[in-house]
């Protein structure tokens, strides 16, 4: 639609008159065509006059649209500049100035720039500044939340913030999870892919760092207990499947080809491949873990659901644009997402989802808020588990940062277990996996020099004041606690770490990172000795034992030219045959007249 | 506590104290801790001390109070010490000295100033039968025979008695330390040896006269014993670990004191010679014909009026000696040891019956001052050839150890090491005599085993000492008290590696001060990837915890 055509079709005479009055220009007559001619003439001869009567948000809306070659988006505009601007209806009140409507028109609730003006607008309006991110270097000790009540709309609550650094933990945990998968120890629902309680227990024992401290310290109320889904022990088995490293078979997770590749030779390139698969995964919707929101599996919802990969891509674009190594408030991150034109809404129509009651508690109109809930859930659960972001968080109880005014939330302790998630920080691993950085080198754990490693195999914490439970958990991966500040390495603890998937290098790296002194030769030698012996078995395969009536028959078969090639060894009347050679062995035995079923 | 974070101590709730060696206040802290805590291990970087009731009582016996200990800890701690540890220290300290054993004209008295404590011990099941008549002043009469048993029983219930009852004077004997030894070398006790003697003697008062002196291997404990003898001028019974050690004591006494051969006797399996100075072994003292027979040789304790009894290597004191010691509490007693740690955990009996620790000097100080050699321990892993590996793989547990120990490739490594130390006196120590003989014949060196006659043994020692023999192969007999002054290196080709103190003794063979860099070497040859390597791990831990530099390398 052309500029002039838009004036004639989408604005009424009253609106045109108001525009001309504001421009202090008289038209040739009072007919609509004459009014439109007058405005068109101004646009052709002195376009700046017409732009000058627009408000600041309107000029920026046009500038954003023209310079970015996109359609006008007031939501994006408001997110970027902090306005609360709405495009006026083209049939506005008589006194309302609808000058912006000269440049844009709407169709089915969407806005479009008229066709013949964008080039002129690019010349007339300055290029808008890029989206600016508010970030901080240090995580604040406390975070503040607004928890409005019916009495007090500005009721603020302050909570201490905890930090979860994921970058070093995630790859180490993945190795352990792959080890468990290879050993066939992880059981998941055949259809759902969700881990069983027993599996969660196994995984939680293999984690390299404690779970997030989300539990409510002050209340013992069982209603405030966190769901098991709010844990890395739950997230990892699902992520293994999402990243394409494992798949469920017969109720058990099995390594896929990619899983075997990364298990046998861990590289961060393979890790990034897995993350890419995770983003594109269609089978799991993290929103399903937000159990307070009902109706997610309803038929109606499937019509309005926005594809999960679409949401993840939007969030990943946002994460990518955040500065590395700096903390950004989750709210700010969401603002960046919207200001960049992203959209992580879960459903296009919120009416299909509800809290408690479909009638009273429907979430129609809360679509954006639901998107924020999804962002929160994805960040706290999957992205932190994968080591793409670090978290600055508090306990989630009674915050309801998104749906605080929704019907029914008052009866719930939290919307998601990550309601207390206040800050996120993109890691270098995150930037690499999301393609921002071309290469990645695993950082040395930046834990301050907290302990000394002694030649008698003891690790002594010399800085107990700053030694956290996460640091303790890290040491417990390969050493045993002896007293308040002393851990001890021995064969069995190192073997346990190796069995759980840690490599010799991992153990040495962690100790070097935290140790105040050079690792003594005795310690290095112990680790290499144990690792060398642990790796003495290079492969394993299935075999069958075939027992014969007597050892003479066994010897007869053993010495048969064809059968001999397939036999591993003989013990009396029994022959051991690798499973892969069983058919050949059976054929050879049949030729000797012996049937082996 | 402003700059407390820079302090060197971390006090743990299990009463272990971690001391940072690199801290500027390390030496101050080490000297302070020596008074009231036992050094458990001293690897590089961090030393671990432990506070026990005994360590606190030892401190109290040396004149330190509970409050002073707590104040010292608070002053040196990096973080506020656990409150319960401070309370326990005060509690332990308050228990010492509440009971005194004294003497009046009628005999011995046990005095308790606290009426409640008096009642408690009066009613205690074990003490009831030991305590004698209860006097009006609230004290108890004690039979002198029960003096030791009473002290033992009191320490078991947590109230050590301070023994101020004094000692009977033994036979007088003039003993003068020579300024020049018989062999013509100038001689005088080192300053720490004199300090140790003064701590033991306490100017001849009843507060001294019994106790234990802890000095590292090679620091000259024999000389401390002789200086004590000179101080007291009394006949002395010396108990050592074996005959070789007995002869060594006799040789040292004759070499460094004015005593003559006829004044010094040996009481052993072969010779039963009781003289004013008699040196015997724990073995002969505890010998009996069969399990139910009595210990006949314990009569030696009563054969003379001994003024002093010296217990060499007191950490090895056998149970029957404890029993007899309990009955001779009126005699002065001196325990000598490199470590108070006993494999059987009877440290409290040593405290009760021999006496409190009187002197303890960290070996690092002696090393720094050049009184003992710096030791470098090296574990050399020797591969086994494939044939032997297979033999090893199929052997039983005992067989495995023997095959690993006797790995023939150790010979070549020993040869290389000998080349490295071609000008130094070197000991080759082994557990298996056959292996030792084989190596000795291959290397053309003399071998010393348990079956070597005493005369030949002494000749070999003399030859070794005087440099006529450079390398000597020794079986386990080299573990204890064999004084080989100039062994610069020891090569352990096989060993049991079981006991901590056995390891210390072996190392002690090379710790005597050396000319030049004062550096001793201790090599252990271990078959790679065998049980020997696992045993070596224990040795490694022990030596590291003793603070020795430890290296591992492959052949």
Image (cartoon, rainbow, N blue to C red):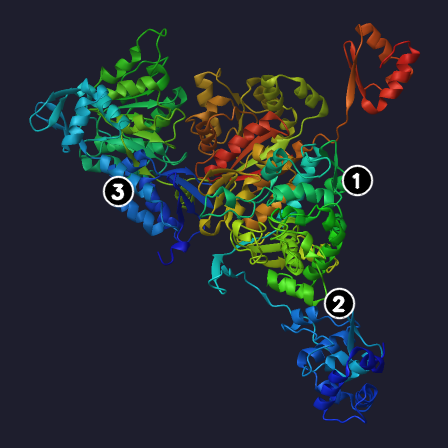
Judge from the rendering whether residue B106 lies leftward or rightward of residue A589; answer left or right. left
Q: Residue furthest left?
A: B136
Asked if one can make out residue B114 in the rendered structure from this viewpoint, the answer is yes
Give the distance between the C-alpha atoms of the residues marked 1 and 2, in whole angstroms: 47 Å
Residue A139 x %, y %: 54, 60
Determine crowd level at label 3: few under 14, some 14-19, many 20+ residues with C-alpha closer than 10 A. Answer: many
Give the distance between the C-alpha atoms of the residues marked 3 and 2, in whole angstroms: 84 Å
Badge number at residue B66: 3
Q: Nearer the viewer, residue A267 or B131?
A: A267
Give the residue at mark 2: A109
Determine crowd level at label 2: few under 14, some 14-19, many 20+ residues with C-alpha closer than 10 A. Answer: few
The subunit letter for the residue under badge 1 reads A
The subunit letter for the residue under badge 2 reads A
Local secondary structure at mark 3:
helix
Residue B232 x %, y %: 22, 31
Give the residue at mark 1: A257
């Amino acid at each position: 639609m052309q500029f002039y055509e838009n004036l004639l079709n989408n604005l009424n005479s009253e609106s045109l008159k108001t525009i001309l009055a504001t421009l202090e220009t008289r038209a040739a007559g009072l007919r609509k065509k004459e009014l439109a001619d007058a405005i068109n003439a101004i646009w052709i001869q002195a376009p700046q006059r017409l732009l000058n009567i627009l408000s600041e948000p309107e000029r920026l809306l046009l500038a954003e649209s023209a310079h970015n070659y996109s359609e006008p988006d007031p939501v994006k505009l408001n997110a970027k500049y902090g306005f609360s601007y709405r495009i006026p209806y083209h049939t506005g009140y008589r006194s309302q100035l609808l000058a912006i409507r000269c440049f844009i028109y709407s169709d089915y609730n969407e806005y479009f720039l008229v066709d013949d003006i964008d080039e002129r607008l690019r010349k007339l309006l300055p290029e808008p500044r890029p989206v600016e991110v508010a970030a901080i270097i240090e995580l604040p000790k406390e975070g503040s939340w607004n928890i409005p009540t019916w009495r007090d709309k500005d009721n603020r609550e302050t909570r201490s913030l905890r930090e979860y650094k994921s970058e070093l933990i995630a790859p180490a945990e993945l190795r352990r999870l792959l080890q468990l998968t290879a050993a066939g120890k992880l059981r998941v629902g055949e259809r759902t892919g969700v881990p069983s309680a027993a599996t969660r227990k196994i995984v939680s024992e293999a984690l390299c760092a404690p779970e997030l401290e989300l539990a409510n310290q002050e209340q013992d109320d069982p209603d405030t207990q966190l769901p098991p889904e709010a844990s890395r022990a739950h997230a990892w088995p699902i992520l293994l499947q999402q990243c394409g490293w494992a798949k469920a078979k017969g109720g058990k997770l099995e390594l896929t080809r990619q899983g075997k590749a990364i298990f046998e030779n861990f590289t961060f390139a393979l890790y990034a491949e897995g993350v890419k698969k995770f983003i594109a995964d269609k089978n799991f919707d993290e929103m399903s873990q937000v159990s307070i929101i009902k109706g997610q599996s309803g038929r109606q919802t499937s019509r309005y659901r926005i594809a999960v990969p679409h949401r993840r891509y939007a969030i990943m674009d946002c994460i990518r644009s955040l500065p590395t190594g700096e903390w950004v408030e989750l709210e700010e991150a969401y603002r960046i997402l919207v200001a960049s034109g992203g959209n992580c809404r879960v459903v296009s129509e919120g009416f299909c989802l509800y809290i408690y009651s479909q009638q009273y508690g429907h979430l129609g109109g809360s679509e954006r808020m639901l998107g924020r809930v999804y962002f929160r859930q994805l960040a706290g659960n999957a992205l932190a588990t994968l080591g793409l972001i670090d978290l600055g968080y508090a306990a989630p109880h009674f915050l309801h940062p998104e749906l605080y005014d929704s019907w029914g939330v008052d009866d719930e302790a939290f919307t998601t277990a990550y309601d207390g998630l206040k800050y996120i920080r993109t890691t270098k691993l995150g930037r690499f996996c999301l393609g921002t950085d071309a290469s990645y080198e695993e950082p040395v754990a930046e834990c301050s020099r907290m302990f000394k490693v002694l030649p008698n195999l003891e690790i002594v914490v010399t800085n107990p004041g700053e030694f956290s439970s996460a640091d303790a958990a890290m040491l417990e991966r390969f050493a045993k606690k002896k007293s308040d500040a002393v851990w001890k390495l021995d064969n069995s603890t190192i073997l346990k770490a190796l069995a759980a998937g840690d490599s010799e290098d991992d153990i040495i790296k962690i100790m070097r990172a935290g140790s105040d002194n050079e690792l003594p030769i005795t310690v290095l030698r112990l680790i290499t000795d144990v690792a060398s012996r642990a790796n003495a078995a290079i492969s394993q395969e299935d075999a069958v034992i075939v027992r014969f009536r007597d050892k003479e028959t066994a010897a007869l078969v053993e010495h048969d030219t064809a059968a001999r090639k397939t036999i591993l060894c003989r013990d009396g009347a029994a022959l051991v045959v690798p499973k892969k050679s069983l058919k050949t062995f059976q054929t050879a035995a049949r030729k000797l007249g012996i049937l082996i079923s | 506590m402003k700059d407390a974070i820079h302090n060197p101590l971390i006090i743990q709730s299990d009463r272990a104290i971690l001391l940072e060696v690199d801290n500027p206040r390390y030496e101050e802290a080490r000297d302070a801790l020596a008074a009231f805590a036992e050094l458990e291990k001293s690897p590089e970087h961090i030393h671990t001390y432990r506070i026990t009731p005994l360590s606190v009582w030892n401190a109290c016996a040396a004149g330190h109070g509970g409050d002073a200990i707590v104040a010292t800890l608070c002053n040196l701690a990096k973080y506020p010490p656990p409150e319960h540890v401070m309370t326990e220290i005060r509690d332990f300290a308050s228990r010492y000295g509440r009971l005194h054993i004294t003497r009046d004209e009628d005999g011995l008295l046990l005095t308790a100033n606290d009426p409640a404590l008096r009642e408690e011990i009066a009613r205690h099941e074990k003490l009831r039968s030991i305590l004698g008549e209860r006097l009006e002043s609230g004290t108890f009469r004690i039979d002198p025979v029960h003096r030791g048993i009473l002290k033992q029983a009191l320490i078991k219930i947590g109230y050590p008695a301070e023994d101020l009852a004094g000692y009977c004077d033994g036979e007088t004997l003039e003993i003068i330390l020579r300024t020049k030894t018989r062999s013509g070398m100038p001689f005088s006790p080192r300053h720490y040896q004199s300090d140790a003697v003064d701590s033991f003697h306490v100017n001849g008062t009843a507060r001294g006269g019994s106790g234990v002196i802890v000095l590292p291997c090679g620091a000259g404990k024999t000389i401390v014993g002789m200086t004590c003898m000179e101080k007291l001028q009394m006949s002395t019974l010396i108990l050592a670990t074996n005959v070789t050690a007995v002869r060594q004591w006799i040789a040292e006494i004759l070499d460094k004191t004015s005593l003559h051969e006829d004044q010094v006797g040996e009481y052993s399996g072969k010779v039963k010679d009781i003289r004013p100075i008699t040196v015997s072994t724990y073995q002969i003292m505890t010998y009996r014909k069969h399990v139910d027979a009595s210990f006949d040789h314990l009569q030696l304790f009563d054969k003379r009026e001994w003024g002093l009894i010296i217990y060499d290597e007191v950490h090895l004191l056998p149970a029957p000696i404890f029993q007899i010691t309990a009955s001779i509490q009126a005699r002065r007693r001196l325990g000598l040891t490199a470590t108070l740690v006993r494999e059987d955990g009877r440290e409290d009996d040593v405290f009760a019956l021999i006496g409190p620790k009187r002197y303890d000097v960290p070996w690092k100080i002696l090393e720094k001052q050049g009184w003992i050699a710096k030791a470098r321990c090296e574990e050399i892993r020797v591969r086994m050839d494939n044939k032997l590996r297979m033999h090893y793989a199929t052997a039983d547990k005992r067989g495995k150890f023997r095959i690993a120990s006797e790995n023939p490739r150790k010979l070549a490594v020993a040869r290389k090491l000998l080349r490295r130390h071609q000008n130094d006196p070197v000991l080759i120590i082994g557990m298996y005599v056959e292996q030792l003989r084989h190596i000795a014949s291959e290397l053309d060196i003399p071998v010393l085993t348990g079956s070597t006659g005493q005369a030949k043994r002494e000749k070999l020692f003399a030859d070794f000492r005087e440099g006529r023999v450079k390398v000597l192969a020794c079986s386990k007999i080299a573990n204890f008290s064999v004084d080989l002054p100039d062994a610069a290196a020891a090569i352990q080709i096989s060993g049991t590696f079981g006991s901590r103190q056995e390891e210390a003794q072996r190392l002690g063979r090379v710790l005597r001060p050396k000319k030049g860099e004062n550096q001793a070497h201790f090599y252990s040859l271990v078959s790679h990837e065998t049980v020997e390597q696992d045993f070596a791990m224990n040795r490694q831990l022990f030596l590291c915890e003793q603070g020795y530099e430890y290296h591992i390398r492959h052949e």
